[in-house]
């Protein structure tokens, strides 16, 4: 037997596995690195977050990714070069984190690498073709070689190959780790794009529902980056709180056909970008409003589309809402979601034992655990969630 296969079999047979989950989202602010101790599989999965760090991207890294990110036309050579470059970079970032945590790489069984999304092309963008695609760069072989650790990566391709759209993937880890027999739960993640998983009580996989809702932070972040040098997001909602919602602009932002499409659905910055905003401003005659008013309106746009999606799709009105992602740190966005949903409180996934900032990186560690030690979960047909194990395996030698 190949020594790498033999090692993988031993890892799969262990009572506990140390898996480092990696996540870099559409905000491109850095790499989330979550070291997880995981035991069991399926609904018997137990996870302990041993350490977590977000390794910030430098301006150089952000600029390199921005050259190919969510663009219809790119320099193909730059994209080709970035694929291994990002993989090696992420592998070195993992080693740096392990050094800071005083953990030897040999103590880590697996890396679960999401990679860096550079383009997401859901089916609604191709109405005349039965096709959809997504692309994450940061090649798994380069992560494995740079770190010396077996790496599982490129999770989204199997999802698409089996009839999905490559997103949202959080549902798999959400169901295995955070579903409950007695409580109806909605797990809302507000990253660049917002999505939520509905977990009805009883832990019946065929009743689970997941969807993107539209923009979370992406439009806010893009406007801040363009107009405020050195700033990357609306810290503590300072600009949003200082502005006023422009009703005409809000109506145009919400008029896109995406919002009348049936659930579940998925989207990305390929739709919700500065061109989208500028078109809505022209059509609403709001090109002269202040930066703070734009940010306030975009924050309300995210809040309304998130809350309305939850209200339209949740069968129970007694759910508890648990939040994760960067949007959780925007008090204005959280206040408006709370008011529109008319619920008692918004909690954090931290209350369930999963740090809200680390959650997505943790969930990829869970996916990797299922890839080698688990089984597929039958989600049925209702929510269009493929029943698959995901990820490609790369050995360091």
Image (spheres, rainbow, N blue to C red):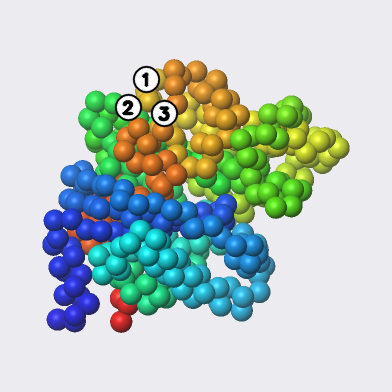
- Sequence-first tag of 2 and 3: 2
Residue at position x 24%, y 25% from top? Answer: 182
Task: Report the side of 126 relative to 2 (left or right).
Answer: right
Residue 347's tag is: 3
- At mark 1, the secondary structure is loop
Task: Report the side of 288 relative to 334 (left or right).
Answer: right
Q: Nearer the viewer, mark 3 or mark 1?
A: 3
Visible residue check, residue 262: no
Q: CA distance from mark 3 to mark 1?
A: 14 Å
Which one is in front, 333 or 56?
56
Which residue bears the numbered disc 1? 318
Task: Report the side of 206 relative to 302 (left or right).
Answer: left
Residue at position x 66%, y 70% from top? Answer: 74
Give the number of callouts.
3
- Sequence-first tag of 2 and 1: 2
- At mark 3, the secondary structure is strand
- Sequence-first tag of 3 and 1: 1
Q: CA distance from mark 2 to mark 1?
A: 7 Å
Which residue bears the numbered disc 2? 184
Residue at position x 78%, y 38% from top? Answer: 291
- At mark 2, the secondary structure is loop
Task: Report the side of 79 relative to 169 (left or right).
Answer: right
Which one is in front, 371 or 48?
48
């Amino acid at each position: 037997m190949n020594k790498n296969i033999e090692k993988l079999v031993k890892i799969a047979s262990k009572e506990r596995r140390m898996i480092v989950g990696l996540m870099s989202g559409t905000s491109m602010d850095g790499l989330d690195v979550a070291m997880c101790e995981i035991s069991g599989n399926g609904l018997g999965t137990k996870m302990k977050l041993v350490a977590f760090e977000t390794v910030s991207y430098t301006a150089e890294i952000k600029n390199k990714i921005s050259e190919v990110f969510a663009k219809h036309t790119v320099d193909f050579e730059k994209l080709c070069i970035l694929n291994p470059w990002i993989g090696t970079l992420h592998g070195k970032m993992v080693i740096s984190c392990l050094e800071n945590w005083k953990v030897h790489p040999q103590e880590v069984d697996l890396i679960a690498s999401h990679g860096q999304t550079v383009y997401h092309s859901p089916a609604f963008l191709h109405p005349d073709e039965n096709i959809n695609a997504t692309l994450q760069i940061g090649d798994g072989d380069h992560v494995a070689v740079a770190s010396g650790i077996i790496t599982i990566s490129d999770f989204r391709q199997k999802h698409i190959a089996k009839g999905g759209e490559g997103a949202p993937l959080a549902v798999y880890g959400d169901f295995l780790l955070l579903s409950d027999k007695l409580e109806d739960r909605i797990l809302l993640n507000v990253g660049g794009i917002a999505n939520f998983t509905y977990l009805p009580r009883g832990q019946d996989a065929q009743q689970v529902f997941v969807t993107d809702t539209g923009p979370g932070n992406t439009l806010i972040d893009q406007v801040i980056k363009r107009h405020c040098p050195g700033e990357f997001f609306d810290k503590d909602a300072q600009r949003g709180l200082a502005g006023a919602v422009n009703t005409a602009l809000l109506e145009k932002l919400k008029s896109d056909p995406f919002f009348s499409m049936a659930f579940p659905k998925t989207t990305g910055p390929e739709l919700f970008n500065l061109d989208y905003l500028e078109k809505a401003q022209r059509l609403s005659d709001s090109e002269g409003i202040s930066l703070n008013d734009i940010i306030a309106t975009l924050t309300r746009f995210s809040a309304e589309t998130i809350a309305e999606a939850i209200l339209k799709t949740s069968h129970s009105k007694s759910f508890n809402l648990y939040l994760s992602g960067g949007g959780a740190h925007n008090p204005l966005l959280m206040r408006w979601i709370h008011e529109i949903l008319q619920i008692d409180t918004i909690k954090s996934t931290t209350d369930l034992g999963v740090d809200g900032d680390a959650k997505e990186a943790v969930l990829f560690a869970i996916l990797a655990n299922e890839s080698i030690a688990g089984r597929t979960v039958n989600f049925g047909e209702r929510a269009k969630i493929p029943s698959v194990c995901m990820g490609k395996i790369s050995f360091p030698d």
